[in-house]
Image (spheres, helix red, strand yellow):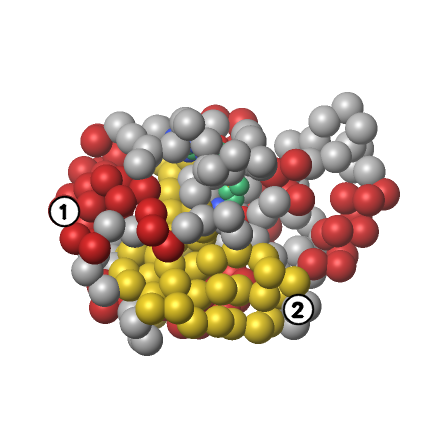
């Protein structure tokens, strides 16, 4: 059962009507309320996708970004700590495969904690070209990220040394540029607005940087 409000959000944001996500007793789904807008995921997929590339998303949730990244890449890999969330992600990516309006390629899902060094090593072994990291902040909206997240720059540094320096990060709107340590090299920090409302930052590292420093992007949903 999903609430009327959630149905409205699914329609308004343009998620496919068959999308599934965990819901509470009131039929609400926090994970979908704070998931990526399709218009943002589609923009990113066009900007960084390539038919020869494998993209892995750390903290992939129910797959709202992977569905669209999968249209522009050879393969997508989703990593999430929650078995339950990954089961919804699998069913959404299977839905994308069947939906003629989404030309989805192939996918693989890995259950695990992104701080477990085996996860990054596995992504390296699978020849991952680009890492997308969606910083989780849904446990605690008010505070600076959450105490559960690894230190931002330490973690990006690890991803760079183990997997690739082609990294994209979805960072919440309270993210501070000062969290990016200069040792990470050039970066682009894009302020993304959807329908004139500030939605999030997207941070690019390595050769994914198109313009150094602060840029802005206005999308209409
Ligand atoms: C907001 S959701 C992700 C939304 C999704 N990336 C999107 O584009 O819509 C955050 C996800 O991070 C996962 N997560 C939180 N901490 C994690 C960790 N340490 N390792 C792996 N996944 C984690 C949660 O299970 C949750 O599914």
Q: Residue at x 60, y 60 (%)?
A: 198
Element carrying mark 2 = loop
For disc 1, the neighbor class at 10 Å (few under 14, some 14 to 19, many from 20) is: few
Measured as percent of width and height from the top left, residue 84 is found at: 54, 27
Image quadrant in which you'd find residue 204: bottom left
Q: Is residue 16 left or right of residue 153?
A: right
Measured as percent of width and height from the top left, residue 164 is found at: 20, 53
For disc 2, the neighbor class at 10 Å (few under 14, some 14 to 19, many from 20) is: few
Q: Residue at x 33, y 33 (%)?
A: 150
Q: Is residue 148 left or right of residue 195?
A: left
Image quadrant in which you'd find residue 152: top left
- Location of residue 38 with respect to 46 vertically, above or below: above
Q: Is residue 185 visible?
A: yes
Measured as percent of width and height from the top left, residue 34 is found at: 61, 45
- Location of residue 220 with respect to 125 vertically, above or below: below
Q: Nearer the viewer, mark 1 or mark 2?
A: 2
Measured as percent of width and height from the top left, residue 65 is found at: 50, 54
Q: Which mark is residue 14?
A: none
Q: CA distance from mark 1 to mark 2?
A: 37 Å
Q: Earlier in the sequence, mark 1 or mark 2?
A: 1
Find disc 1 in the rendering and name its residue: 161
Element carrying mark 1 = helix
Nearest the eye: 11 or 138: 138
Q: Residue at x 21, y 31 (%)?
A: 117
Q: Is residue 103 visible?
A: no
Find disc 2 in the rendering and name its residue: 196
């Amino acid at each position: 059962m999903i609430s009327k409000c959630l149905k409205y959000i699914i329609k308004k944001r343009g998620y496919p009507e068959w999308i599934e996500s965990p819901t509470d007793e009131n039929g609400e789904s926090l994970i979908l309320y704070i998931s990526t807008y399709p218009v943002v995921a589609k923009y990113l997929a066009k900007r960084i996708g390539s038919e020869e590339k494998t993209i892995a998303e750390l903290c992939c949730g129910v797959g709202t970004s992977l569905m669209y990244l999968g249209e522009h890449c050879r393969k997508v890999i989703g990593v999430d700590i929650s078995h339950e969330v990954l089961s919804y992600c699998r069913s959404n990516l299977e839905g994308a495969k069947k939906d003629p309006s989404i030309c989805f390629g192939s996918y693989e899902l890995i259950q695990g904690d992104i701080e477990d060094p085996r996860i990054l090593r596995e992504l390296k072994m699978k020849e991952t070209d680009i890492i997308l990291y969606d910083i989780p902040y849904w446990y605690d909206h008010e505070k600076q990220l959450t105490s559960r997240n690894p230190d931002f720059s330490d973690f990006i540094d690890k991803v760079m040394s183990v997997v690739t320096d082609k990294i994209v990060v979805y960072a919440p709107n309270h993210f501070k540029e000062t969290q990016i340590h200069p040792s990470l090299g050039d970066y682009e920090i894009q302020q993304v607005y959807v329908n004139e409302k500030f939605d999030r930052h997207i941070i690019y590292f390595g050769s994914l940087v198109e313009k150094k420093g602060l840029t802005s992007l206005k999308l209409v949903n």
